[in-house]
Image (cartoon, rainbow, N blue to C red):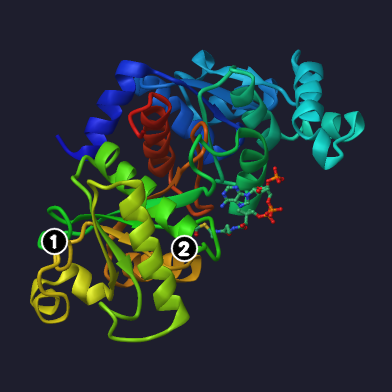
C-alpha cells in the first residue's frame, strides 16, 4: 500500500469532522463529494445551501447531500461564536461588533467551529491566500502545548529512490515562519521529525541545512543553525539529527564522506530543515517544477488542532489528500 492509501485507510478508521470554509468553490465541492464517497471524513461545507445544491446538480455530485452545510448569513451559532471571539481576543481589543463581522467570515467560522468543539480540523486555501487562511488559525486555534511556532512541511516524492527513504523526503519550513530564531528552528526540526514519522511513516534522519558544513564557513546565519541543532538535540535526545550541513552533504553519501565523516545523518537525510522560509519555499518549488518531484503539502505543524492550507493552484485530488492528512492529524496520528 502506498503511503497516501495508508493515510486514507487510517482516516477511514477515525472519520473526523473536517470543515471546508470554501464550500461553494468548484474543486472544494467536488473534493467533498469524493471524500464522502470514499467515507474517510465527515464534511462540513461553509456556504449558501442553495448555491451548494445548484453546484452539486451542475457537476452531477451524488454524495454531497451527506455534507453538513453552515450558511455564514444565518447559522444558529453566530451569536455564540462571536461571544467566544470577544472572549478569546479581548486583550487585543475585540469588540462585539467586530466579532459579529468576523463570525460571518468563513475562514473565521471554520476555526471557531474547531475551538468550540464543532469540528476537528479545517482545510482551506483553494480560493484564499495562505496568510488569510493562517491568521485566523494562529489567532484562534493557536499552537499546541510546548510549541510556539507553526510551520509547514512538504512530503516530497521523487522516483530517484536513492534519495531519502525510497524517494520520500520531508522538507520544512516551506510555508509559514519567515525568519525563525534558533529556538524556533529547533522546534521546527522536532515537529517535522514527528510529521516524518507519523504522517510519512519514515524513521526521521534530520539535516539542519545551511551554506556551510561543519564549520566550513563562518557567519552568524551558520551559527543560528548550529545553535538550533544543539537545542533540538536537547528537546529530542534520541532524534537522529545533524547540522549544520549543506544540501549535498545531507543527501549524497560521497559528499558526506568528504565533508561530514562520521555523521549518522549526512548522506542519508530524509528530513531537510531550511534556515528560513525564503530558502524552504524557493527550494521546494524549484525541485517540484524543474525536477518534477511531487510535493504534498504544506502540512501545518505545531497547531493545537489541524488546519491545513491549500495552494490556489490545487487540484480536486490535492484537496482529497489534504483532508485525509488532516483527519490523521486530528486523530493524533501526527503527534
Ligand atoms: N507560529 C505561531 N503563531 C504565529 C506565527 C507562527 N509562525 N506567526 C504569527 N503568529 C501569531 C502571532 O503570535 C499573533 O497572535 P496574536 O494575534 O494572538 O498575538 C497572530 O499569529 C498574528 O501575528 P502577526 O505577527 O500579526 O502576523 P501576521 O498576521 O502579520 O502574519 C503569517 C502571520 C500570516 C503567518 C505571516 O507570517 C505570513 O504571511 N507568513 C508567510 C505565509 C506565506 O505567504 N507563505 C508562502 C506561501 S505558502 C506556499 O507557497 C506553500
| Frontmost residue, 206 versus 76 | 206
Query: Mark number for residue 182?
Result: 2
Q: Position of residue 180 (x, y in %)?
A: 52, 62
Q: For the view shown, which residue lies furthest in the bottom direction?
A: 217
In the rendered structure, the answer to whether residue 222 lies left or right of residue 268 reads: right
Quadrant that contains the C terminus: top left
* Mark 1: few/some/many CA within 10 Å (<14, 14-19, 20+): some
Q: Residue furthest front?
A: 234
Q: Position of residue 164 (x, y in %)?
A: 17, 58
Q: In this view of the protein, can residue 189 be seen by the observer?
A: yes
**Dot 1: element:** loop
Q: Within the image, what quadrant is residue 280 found in?
A: bottom left
Report which quarter residue 202 is drawn in. Answer: top left
Quadrant for residue 254, please give it.
bottom left
Q: Would you say the residues marked 1 and 2 are in contact, meaning their CB atoms lie under 8 Å apart?
A: no
As displayed, is residue 156 above or below residue 96? below
Q: Is residue 131 above or below residue 5?
A: below
- For marks 1 and 2 on the same chain, the one whose residue lies earlier in the sequence: 2
Residue 174 can be seen in this image: no
The residue sitting at 44% across, 70% down in the picture is 224
Q: Is mark 1 within 8 Å of ligand 1?
A: no
Q: How many marks?
A: 2
Question: What is the crowding at mark 2: few (fewer than 14 residues within 10 Å), some, or many (at least 20)?
Answer: many
Residue shown at the point (52%, 33%) measured from the top left: 304
Which numbered disc covers residue 22? none
Give the residue displayed 50% in from the left and 52% down from the top.
311
* Pick the front one: 7 or 38: 7
- Residue 14: percent from left, percent from top: 35, 17
Residue 40, position in %: x, y? 36, 22
Question: Which residue does the numbered mark 1 point to in the structure image?
Answer: 264
Amino acid at each position: 500500500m502506498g503511503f497516501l492509501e495508508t493515510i486514507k485507510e487510517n482516516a477511514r478508521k477515525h472519520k473526523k469532522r473536517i470543515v471546508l470554509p470554501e464550500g461553494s468553490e468548484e474543486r472544494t465541492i467536488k473534493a467533498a463529494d469524493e471524500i464522502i464517497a470514499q467515507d474517510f471524513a465527515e464534511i462540513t461545507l461553509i456556504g449558501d445551501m442553495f448555491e451548494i445544491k445548484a453546484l452539486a446538480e451542475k457537476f452531477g455530485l451524488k454524495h454531497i447531500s451527506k455534507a453538513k452545510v453552515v450558511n455564514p448569513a444565518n447559522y444558529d451559532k453566530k451569536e455564540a461564536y462571536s461571544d467566544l471571539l470577544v472572549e478569546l481576543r479581548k486583550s487585543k481589543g475585540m469588540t462585539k461588533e467586530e466579532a459579529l463581522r468576523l463570525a460571518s467570515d468563513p475562514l473565521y467560522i471554520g476555526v471557531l467551529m474547531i475551538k468550540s468543539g464543532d469540528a476537528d480540523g479545517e482545510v482551506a486555501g483553494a480560493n484564499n491566500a495562505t496568510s488569510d487562511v493562517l491568521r485566523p488559525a494562529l489567532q484562534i486555534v493557536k499552537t499546541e502545548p510546548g510549541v510556539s511556532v507553526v510551520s509547514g512541511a512538504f512530503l516530497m516524492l521523487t522516483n530517484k529512490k536513492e534519495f531519502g527513504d525510497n524517494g520520500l523526503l520531508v522538507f520544512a519550513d516551506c510555508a509559514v515562519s519567515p525568519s525563525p530564531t534558533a529556538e524556533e528552528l529547533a522546534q521546527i526540526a522536532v515537529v517535522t521529525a514527528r510529521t516524518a514519522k507519523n504522517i510519512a511513516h519514515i524513521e526521521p534522519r534530520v539535516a539542519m541545512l545551511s551554506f556551510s558544513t561543519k564549520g566550513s564557513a563562518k557567519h552568524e546565519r551558520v551559527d543560528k543553525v548550529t545553535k538550533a541543532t544543539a537545542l533540538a538535540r536537547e528537546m529530542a535526545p534520541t532524534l537522529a539529527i545533524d547540522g549544520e550541513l549543506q544540501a549535498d552533504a545531507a543527501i549524497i553519501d560521497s559528499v558526506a564522506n568528504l565533508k561530514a565523516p562520521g555523521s549518522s545523518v549526512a548522506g542519508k537525510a530524509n528530513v531537510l530543515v531550511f534556515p528560513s522560509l525564503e530558502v524552504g519555499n524557493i527550494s521546494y518549488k524549484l525541485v517540484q517544477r524543474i525536477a518534477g518531484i511531487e510535493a504534498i503539502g504544506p502540512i501545518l505543524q505545531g497547531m493545537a488542532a489541524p488546519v491545513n492550507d491549500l495552494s490556489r493552484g490545487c487540484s480536486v485530488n490535492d484537496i482529497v489528500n489534504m483532508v485525509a492528512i488532516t483527519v490523521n492529524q486530528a486523530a493524533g496520528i501526527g503527534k
